[in-house]
């Protein structure tokens, strides 16, 4: 799927998976905000965000194309929730 040093590979490692499902209907993968933050910190030299929150949003964007839910939500919903401040307690 991806080179070993790219964000999708790191996400798969965090999930303990070799690959993700091909459709939203079949997807069972789910990440938590703390897991997203761990990936963001691991990849901080490769991501462009200036803060943990910004880098976490980049990782969440990767989850959109990988069809991985975040906190049980579709990634776009989770991104909106983070931007809305619903998870600010994690980023402070």
Image: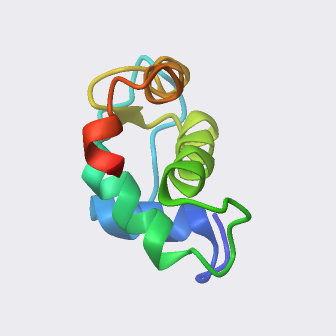
Instruction: Work out which residue is located at the far right of the displayed protein and give it.
Output: 48
Q: Quadrant of residue 13?
A: bottom left
Q: Residue at x 67, y 78 (%)?
A: 3
In the image, residue 92 sits, relative to residue 45, either above or below, namely above
State how many labels appear.
0
Residue at position x 54%, y 35% in the image:
22
User: Which of 16/83 is in front?
Assistant: 83
Q: Position of residue 75 (x, y in %)?
A: 49, 28
Quarter containing the N terminus:
bottom right
Against 58, residue 69 (above or below) is above
Judge by depth and name the residue closer to the eye, 37 or 5.
Answer: 37
**Image: 51 above or below 32:** below
Above or below: residue 30 compared with residue 56: above
Q: Position of residue 79 (x, y in %)?
A: 52, 28
Please state the horizontal and vertical placement of residue 34, each as a whole percent of the image: 26, 53
Question: In the rendered image, which quarter is residue 66 located in?
Answer: top right
In the figure, is residue 67 to the left or right of 85? right
Q: Residue at x 38, y 31 (%)?
A: 69
Residue 14 as seen in the image, left or right of residue 46: left
């Amino acid at each position: 799927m991806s080179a070993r040093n790219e964000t999708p590979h790191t996400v798969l490692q965090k999930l303990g998976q070799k690959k993700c499902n091909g459709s939203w209907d079949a997807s069972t993968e789910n990440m938590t905000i703390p897991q997203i933050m761990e990936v963001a910190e691991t990849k901080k030299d490769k991501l462009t965000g200036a803060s943990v929150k910004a880098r976490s949003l980049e990782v969440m964007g990767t989850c959109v194309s990988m069809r991985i839910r975040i906190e049980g939500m579709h990634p776009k919903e989770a991104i909106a929730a983070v931007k809305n401040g619903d998870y600010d307690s994690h980023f402070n």
